[in-house]
Image (spheres, rainbow, N blue to C red):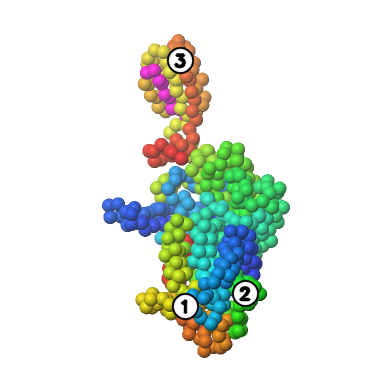
Amino acid sequence: MSEVIIVKNLKKTYPLPRKNRKNGETSFDAVKGTNFSVEQGEIFGILGPNGAGKTTTLEIIEGLTVQTSGTVSVLGLDNIKDSSKIKQQIGVQLQSSDYLPSMSLEELLHLFAGLYGKTADIEKLLGFVNLENKRHSQVKDLSGGQKQRFSLASALVNDPKILFLDEPTTGLDPRARRDVWDLVRKVNEQGITIVLTTHYMEEAEYLCQRVAIMDSGNILAINNPKKLIEDLSHTTQISFLTEKEVDPKIFSSISDIEKLYNNYPKVVIEIKSLDIIGDVVKTLQEKKISFSSFTIKTASLEDVYLDLTGKVYED
Amino acid sequence: MNLSFLQLLKMNLRLIYRNPTGMFFTLVMPLILYTALSILPIGRVLGSEVSYSDFVLPGIIALTIMQGGIYGLAYWFIDLKSRNVIKRFLVTPLKKSEFIASVLISRIIIALLQLILLSIIGWWFFGATISGNIIFALGFAALGSAIFLLLGLIITTFADTYEAAAPITAAIGLPLTFLGNIFYPISSLPSGLRTLAEILPITYLVDGIRSVYLNSGSWSDWGTDAGMLLIWLVIMIVLNLWLFRLRS
């Protein structure tokens, strides 16, 4: 597989507005020297809380912002020198962008296609995002989900090789979010590489083949979301309440327990494999210990984030 | 260059004529103002040989052109900027310079239409004198429009929101409106204000069109006006190259 985006030692420093200066600091490092690459054909996610530097990173790759130092290559082109050649071959959906007023969806798509020197296949584009009956409507008359779908269509007018989505489902209801996810997968199935930022863990887990976890301007880990979770010391946590205080030694025959917290009446056991759950229950029954509120929690990217940063993830 | 410049221009014009409030202020309001001033017996006060209707027509034309820049363009641009509409264009191969040029030229075309419309109404209903060649008047309209549009662009650099822009446009617009030769000649101003008025671009825009319409319309009548406006145009271009940013 070939790499379509290569980012090396990327740094971006913004001057701080006078009123936000503290302790004599005059600048703010939004991105602090990140390295990563995106493979052709994958869905690559940049995941992190607000202010992590995701949008800045994306805007540098898209040619909207120039980095302070480091290099970015997109489709073999330099992001500063060949910015307009790159723009010709990528599609971009901005975090919150609006469109020119008093123009219909059809007119807007024609306009955007024209900017790339192409002719828009309106029926195909609007059909793809399920808005074929809205071609004469204006953006202001669309719902949040429809607007986001239209914005996806407008990012596809130039048949891009890479599609950038900045927080594609922020502010959408679950149903509309699902629709966008389906579309993103459909776009990817056509061979288009997708780079997206999100602060939703489940979005990254559901969509991305690889995720970069970003926090305060640094990338902390890059891997397949499932791998990231598997690499945790524990992938599953079981917990239950007992009537009487239990002696943790009763579980000593079970070999694969990673950690056990006995905090009467609550027992928490961290394990790597789900097979052990049966052994735990059997042991409890054999010892005639009655228990309640038995819960199994499989680890998610949230636990990965907690593990990497020591902070609870808040989106 | 992908989308032809002409298409971009067409898009900009379409945006202007599809905006009903904008159209009201660019076309209907000046007509109402001009009609009112022509009917009211204000002219007598000035005691000149020229009818007030004749006198004020170039003033209203210039006022409309000025407003198109510092109100029309500035507010429109701030609105687009605050809703990230412009950013959406910047991720396409469209060059910033092409985008700005299409916006400016489409609005200069509107300024020329405003001059033509007001002149026709003036000539048809109020018997306005147009003694010189209207081509020169169109030249003044284009020049003046460019100056005030560029001034509007500078305002958008200092104001990101309508609330921030309103006091700036008022501070610039009011003196231009009342000191700038529009409703009465600057010779009737007290000397201090007159000195100020003699610097303002609007003074020369009004005087230039007025010279073409009311005098013989020869070069000697409006040469100074054209010269002063060209100086202002250069100042505005330099200021924009120095200050203007498409993104905040």
Q: Amino acid at mark 1?
A: Pro
The chain carrying label 3 is A
The structure residue drawn at horizontal position 66% and vertical position 58%, both measured from the top left corner, is: A107
The crowd level at tag 3 (other Cα within 10 Å; few <14, some 14-19, many 20+) is some
Of residues B53 and A191, the one drawn nearer to the viewer in this rendering: B53
Q: Main secondary structure of the magenta part?
A: strand
Q: Are marks 3 and 1 on the same chain?
A: no
Q: Which mark is residue B31?
A: none
Residue sitting at 60 percent across and 62 percent down? B23
Labels 3, 2: front one: 2
Residue annotated with mark 3? A291
Residue A74 pos. (x, y %) = 53, 59
Q: Tell me which amino acid carries mark 3.
A: Phe
User: Of helix, strand and loop, which one carries label 2?
Assistant: helix
Residue at 71% across / 48% down in the picture? A133
Mark 3 or 1, closer to the camera: 1
Label 2, label 1: how far apart the Cα atoms are:
21 Å
Q: Which amino acid, mark 2?
A: Phe
- Residue position marked by numbered label 1 in the rendering: B185
Q: Which residue is mark 2?
A: B126
Q: Is residue B45 visible?
A: yes
